[in-house]
Every structure is written in structure tokens, then in C-alpha cells.
């Protein structure tokens, strides 16, 4: 795993603005690689927003938006960035491990079905009779059953190939599979990098086909949150500032990513970031209500939608899944 840390020595006193104890180390896990959508965290490091909260933040790459939840539950990472729908299922399966989301980042999830024009797939039902490539830990694939239900797909007519993340887009480009599950801003630009023309790439966002689900959120280990509430609140506050700066100037924000990803293509990462901001983060609801919160009625509806194709034993309540106590006032979260 790759790691980037923030160094510096601060005094032992509490910082102004209600920050956590000075120079508190904090490990944070992303869901994936150091790509465009991760910009806000690195902006918060480079502009000293975490430092101003007394935090020495270390950011690591992650194994996907589902698998990393167990790492937060185990305390390997006190905080992380993963899929809230998978958290709902995790809480059901592990009722004693109360990992909670504290900052909603993807108000509209990037879950998508991605295909190419040559396959003839234009709508969800067209997946019948086709081969779908889907990595088992993929956050988008985790929503497959709900997507099938909402769109009347006969799942028995769709062949699912469990493929690895590194070969997902290459297999679609080569014709080995007809469609793939993935995050829109990941698969789209990965295909461009494989030489596929933009006009040949077809992206079906699941949120446009019946899913009311939220996407990835910042999550925290319950024991850590109870022992360190100021640390959690400080991390949330600083991250929101990083988001605000990223929205104002994506081209400047992407520089913070490229410093940690020397092999990346800055033009593509900027476009990836801009797609994520447009489709997933800066939604009409967020503009009206501020970044980082959730509509509890919608969250309840999303849990109901998960229940359509997932049998709960200990169904969590919305307030079990999302804890809003660490958010600053809505006025401080405007984009």
C-alpha cells in the first residue's frame, strides 16, 4: 500500500476553533488509488487544514469501496472512505461492530454499468444474454441485485464473470466481456487510456435507473470516535474545507494529487475529478443543504431498497448508519 503523511511539530495546547489535541496522528484509508476524486484530502493536507485541527494525517490507498470497511471495524484504520450501502449490510452482519458514516461525500453514487457501443447494450434489459465483468469487491457490483430488481432484468440470463480490477477495462475493450460494473469516473477514463474513443463508451449510472442509494462516505471506528470526538470533528471540518477549495478550483486541487501520483496523467485526473464533482458531489440537494449531510428519509428509503434483494437479520436504522453529530453547521458546509 502507498502512504503519504503530513509532518510538522505543533504545540501541546488545543488549537483555536475547537481543534483536537495538537499533532494527533490519524491514519485514513481511501477506497482506491490516488486519483482525481481524492483531491480534497490532499488539498486539506497541503493547505494545512488538518494541521490547523492538530492532526497529523496519513492517507493510504485502499482495496475497493467495500472491503475496507472491515479495516475500520478492526481499528486498523480509525477512519476511512467507503460505500455506505455496504456499511448497511456490514452492520447487519456484524451488529456488535458499530462503524458509522460521519460525512457523506458522494450524494449521488458513481455506481454504473459501463459498456461499448459495439455491444448493442443501450438499456439495462439489454444485458440479458451478455457477459458482465464484475470484481467481487466492487462497490458498484454490490448494488447489482437492486439494479436487477428495479429494471426487471432476468439475472439468470446474465453471465457474471468475477474479474480483477486491473483487467476489468482491458477485458471490456478487447471484447472478452460485454459490460462491466464500476465507478463511472474510474471505468470511463480507464477506457480512454486504453485507446477507446469517448463516443464509443456508454455509461449507465445506476442512480438514473431507479436506485435511490447514496455513495461513499467517511466512516469511523466507534471506539475511536468515542475516545476522540474532537479528532473526528476536526477531520470532518478540515476535509469539508478541502472539498470547498476543490470545487472552487479543480485545476489547482489536482496538483495536490499529482504530487502523490507521479505516473498519472494530470489531464485525465483533472477530467476524472470534474466528472466526480459534477455527477456525484455537487448535486442540487448539496447546493441547497450544504455538503456532507444526508436526508434521513432518503437514507431510510435506500435501506428499504437494499432489503428488496438482501435479507436482513438485524436491519440497521438510518441513525445507526449515519451519525451527523460531527458535522459543522450547514452554513459552514455550503459549496
Image (tube, rainbow, N blue to C red):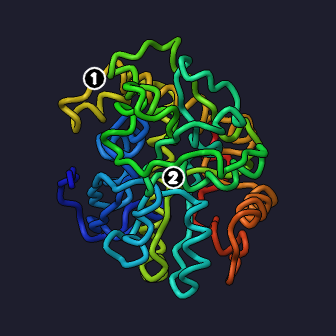
Q: Nearer the viewer, residue 161 or 7?
A: 161
Secondary structure under badge 1?
loop
Is residue 247 left or right of 34 when viewed as pictured? right
Q: Residues within 10 Å of mark 2 (few under 14, many from 20)?
A: many
- Quadrant of the frame with the C terminus: top right
Residue visible at 47% across and 42% down in the picture: 133
For residue 268, what is the image quadrant? top left
Looking at the rendered image, the quarter that the N terminus falls into is bottom left
Residue 307: x %, y % from top left: 74, 67
State the mark number for residue 132: none
Furthest toward the bottom, the residue is: 96
Which residue does the image show at 67% across and 44% down from the upper left? 290
As drawn, 48 above or below 326: above
Residue at image location 40% in from the left, 63% down from the top? 68
The residue wearing badge 2 is 139
How far across and how far down the image is residue 96, in percent? 54, 88
Give coordinates of residue 259: x percent, y percent: 22, 34
**Residue 101 found in image quarter:** bottom right
**Mark 1, residue position:** 265
Q: Residue at 53% of width from left, 11% of height from top? A: 199
Amino acid at each position: 500500500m502507498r502512504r503519504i503523511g503530513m509532518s510538522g511539530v505543533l504545540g501541546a495546547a488545543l488549537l483555536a476553533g475547537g481543534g483536537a489535541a495538537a499533532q494527533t496522528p490519524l491514519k485514513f484509508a481511501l477506497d482506491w488509488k490516488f486519483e482525481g476524486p481524492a483531491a480534497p484530502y490532499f488539498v486539506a493536507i497541503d493547505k494545512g487544514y488538518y494541521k490547523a485541527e492538530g492532526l497529523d494525517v496519513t492517507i493510504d490507498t485502499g482495496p475497493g469501496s467495500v472491503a475496507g470497511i472491515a479495516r475500520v471495524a478492526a481499528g486498523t484504520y480509525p477512519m476511512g472512505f467507503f460505500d455506505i450501502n455496504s456499511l448497511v449490510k456490514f452492520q447487519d452482519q456484524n451488529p456488535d461492530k458499530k462503524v458509522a458514516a460521519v460525512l457523506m461525500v458522494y450524494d449521488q453514487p458513481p455506481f454504473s454499468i459501463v459498456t461499448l457501443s459495439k455491444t448493442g447494450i443501450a438499456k439495462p434489459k439489454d444485458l440479458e444474454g451478455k457477459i458482465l465483468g464484475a470484481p467481487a469487491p466492487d462497490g458498484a457490483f454490490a448494488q447489482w441485485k437492486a439494479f436487477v430488481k428495479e429494471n426487471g432484468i432476468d439475472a439468470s440470463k446474465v453471465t457474471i464473470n468475477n474479474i480483477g480490477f486491473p483487467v476489468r477495462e482491458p477485458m471490456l475493450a478487447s471484447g472478452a466481456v460485454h459490460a462491466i460494473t464500476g465507478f463511472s469516473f474510474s471505468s470511463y477514463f480507464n477506457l480512454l487510456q486504453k485507446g477507446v474513443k469517448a463516443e464509443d463508451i456508454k455509461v449507465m449510472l445506476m442512480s438514473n435507473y431507479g436506485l435511490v442509494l447514496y455513495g461513499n462516505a467517511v466512516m469511523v471506528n466507534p471506539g475511536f470516535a468515542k475516545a476522540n470526538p474532537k479528532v473526528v470533528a476536526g477531520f470532518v471540518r478540515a476535509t469539508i474545507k478541502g472539498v470547498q477549495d476543490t470545487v472552487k478550483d479543480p485545476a489547482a486541487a489536482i496538483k495536490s494529487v499529482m504530487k502523490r501520483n507521479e505516473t498519472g496523467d494530470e489531464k485525465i485526473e483533472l477530467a476524472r475529478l470534474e466528472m466526480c464533482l459534477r455527477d456525484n458531489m455537487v448535486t442540487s440537494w448539496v447546493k441547497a443543504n450544504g455538503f456532507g449531510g444526508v436526508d434521513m428519509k432518503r437514507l431510510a428509503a435506500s435501506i428499504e431498497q437494499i432489503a428488496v434483494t438482501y435479507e436482513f437479520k438485524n436491519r440497521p436504522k438510518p441513525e445507526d448508519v449515519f451519525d451527523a453529530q460531527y458535522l459543522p453547521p450547514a452554513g459552514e458546509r455550503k459549496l
